[in-house]
Image (cartoon, grey):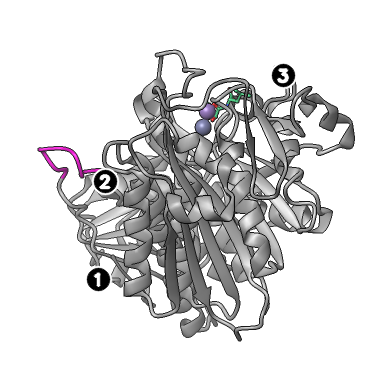
Amino acid sequence: MKYSVKAGAAEKVSADCVAVVVFNKGQLSAEAQSIDATTTKAISKVTASEDFTGKLGDTLVLHNPSGVTAKRVLLLGAGEEKKLGALQAAKMLKAGLKAAGKLRAASLHFALGSLQLSDRDYPWLATRLAQEAETSSYRYNETKSKKSPPPATRSVSLSPPSGAQRKKLEAALKNGQVIGRGINNARQLGNLPGNICTPSYLAEQALELGTKQRAITTRVLSEKQMARLGMDSLLSVSAGSDQEAKLIIMHYKGAKTDSKPYVLVGKGITFDTGGISLKPGAAMDEMKFDMCGAASVLGTMTAVAELKPAINVIGVIAAAENMPSGRATKPGDIVTSMAGKTIEILNTDAEGRLVLCDALTYVERFKPRTVIDIATLTGAAVATFGNHATALLSNDQKLANSLLECGEASLDRAWQLPLWDEYQPLLSSNFADIANIGGPRAGTITAACFLSRFTEKQKWAHLDIAGSAWFSGAQKGATGRPVGLLLEYLLRQKA
Ligand code: BES
Ligand code: MN
Ligand code: ZN
């Protein structure tokens, strides 16, 4: 997709389709008024008849309106003008792009120069437009014989508001495009089935990113190398699988070598059967999404390499497949983690924390400024938040606040849960230093408590994306979250 800034009156813009805003009760934006005036009231007519009322998220296409250069006018319902904020604008853009996607319009112009958002500036709108255009053009085709046709839209342009700096808007569009691509990247990896997207496949993707991008260097540790490091907790998860576990480390260098890095650690369980603590059959296919944390790290690193912030970032992926077999770990087995703590594995289905704890210990060597792990860790997070919020837990309130803020800013939102000491005793074991499950209550919190035992020396936050990483049902598919949040966070940091 190509993005550009295009000035001029809405009715004179050359494009296959021009989009203008209509507010509640048919109240026209300046651009809509301007088209209305040249078309002998083509827009007022549809609003007067109440065929289109300007309700947020509604759209209507007018074909060949006389006096307008564009072949079509797309009306975007924006709801109440005073209530138009970031969330509403994103919804409006998404709906507009969806409607435009059904037309065979190769070029699409958004005449939004007069639009005022209550809580964001115009460059934000430009970024969001490109991000939404990018994500709305994503199609999953990989494993289908009948591929969906490529989206008709090939270029998207945006009107500048009066007095805008063109360069700034162009940069904003570019950023949105890169963020959108990063999100699509994560979605694609998430959507691939477990027999294609294995730990080795994730490693190949990361190595490929390292060869394509000069600023990124990738290293992949084999099971043998992990064994030498004492990562027996991580290795206990892949023990039952024919797929070799991989620890993938991607270094992005955007600052001096001695500048402490920001570290991301993703859970990359490419399929989670539960192991010997086998999961029930219903919807087990969705456990191919159990590597969405890893996918978000890869998607974020791809975007970071293109946006080139002046910081150092390290993306780590703990990749393994959780399978039952004669060699699989059994409930009651005790392993020693890389940190030296012994773990009683009471449930082999609580495997995410077992791979993450060793990865979190491993990253201590980088002396991170902050460490953020991203994991589809608990069913309890789905029960608590549904699809909308990512669960956030942290041992550093400043980091937590910053992530909450970035979630709001990117509309990729998180909500904090307590990581109080009172929950820690739930992980007591009679036979080891710690048990890998904390009982049926407060599952998202006890999972984070487990990880907190391995991050005491670091400023750490945990994002449980079990609810936000994918949709079930008819909409089944990965969302690419929380790439938006992570990029917002990284782009705000300094070396
Ligand atoms: N990958 C799952 C968590 C999950 C389950 C995410 C359902 C999304 C939907 C994780 O490995 C797991 O199985 N967690 C268990 C932990 C329990 C055994 C303590 C869970 O949440 O049931
Ligand atoms: Mn599990
Ligand atoms: Zn899992």
Q: Residue furthest right?
A: 422
Q: Which mark is residue 14?
A: 1
Q: Tell me the residue at 20%/43% (across/down).
A: 141
Quarter holding ligand 1: top right
Label 3's element? loop
- How crowded is the residue under tag 1: few (<14 C-alpha within 10 Å), some, or many (20+)? some
Mark nearest the camera among 1 and 3 is: 3
Q: Report if residue 276 is visible in the image.
A: yes
Picture quarter with the C terminus: bottom right
Q: Report if residue 136 is visible in the image.
A: no
Q: Which residues are magenta?
A: 140-148
Give the residue at mark 2. 139
Query: Mark 1 or mark 3, which has the lower sequence index?
Result: 1
Mark nearest the camera among 1 and 2 is: 2
Label 1's element? loop
Picture quarter with the N terminus: bottom left
Query: Does residue 414 appear left or right of residue 423 in this picture?
Result: left
Give the residue at mark 3. 439
Mark 1: amino acid: Ser
